[in-house]
Amino acid sequence: MVHIMVVTHGPLAQAMKESSAMFFGSMADSLTTLGLFPTDSPEGLKDKIADKVKETDDGDGVLIFVDIFAGSPFNMAAMAIDELKDEHKIQCFTGVNMPVLMEALSSCETMTLDELAEDIVSVAKDSIVDVRKSLDI
């Protein structure tokens, strides 16, 4: 099973996990969430990301979602990935939202990490919709 990690500024990752539980029940418990708070050091977050990858990767890989491109969680995830790339299969996407997280949760047991990464890109493109244009209102 591909393990999923969400890393964000503040409590957003944990809130997304709690919202996911509304759809996936206890399966959402498998999500790893990490938040960077004002009193935290970015380097400490990098270490936590690396530790969680080592702890949760069962050989199928880890899919990391971060909130903002080039933000501290993104930068620390990239540094952790660079450190671990020879030992672990890791994919990382920025701009996490509920549709892509739900897709990942629903597919992490049946798809490989590479298949899941390709699927996420496809779903992400369709996850932001202009309601007025879509409904012609």
Image (cartoon, rainbow, N blue to C red):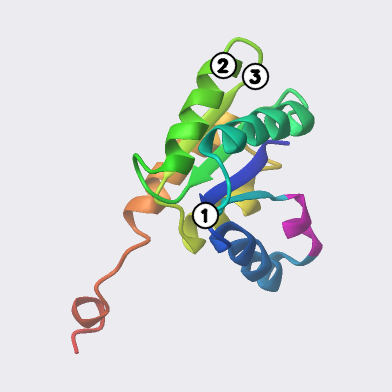
Q: Which mark is residue 38?
A: 1
Taking 136 as reference, is 100 left or right?
right
Our reading of the magenta stretch's main secondary structure is helix
Residue 72 placement: quadrant:
top left
Give residue 43's position: percent from left, percent from top: 55, 32
Give residue 115's position: percent from left, percent from top: 53, 33
63 w.r.t. 128: above or below: above
Marks 1 and 3 in Cβ contact (< 8 Å): no
Q: Secondary structure at mark 3?
A: loop
Q: Nearer the viewer, residue 69 or 63?
A: 69
Q: Amino acid at mark 3?
A: His
Marks 2 and 1 in Cβ contact (< 8 Å): no
Q: Secondary structure at mark 1?
A: loop
Q: Nearer the viewer, residue 64 or 100?
A: 64
Q: Where does the magenta region start and end?
A: 26-30
Q: Which mark is residue 88?
A: 3
| First-in-chain label (2 vs 3) | 2
The mark lying in front, picked from 1 and 3, is 1
Q: Identify the residue at horizontal 32%, vertical 64% (top origin).
A: 128
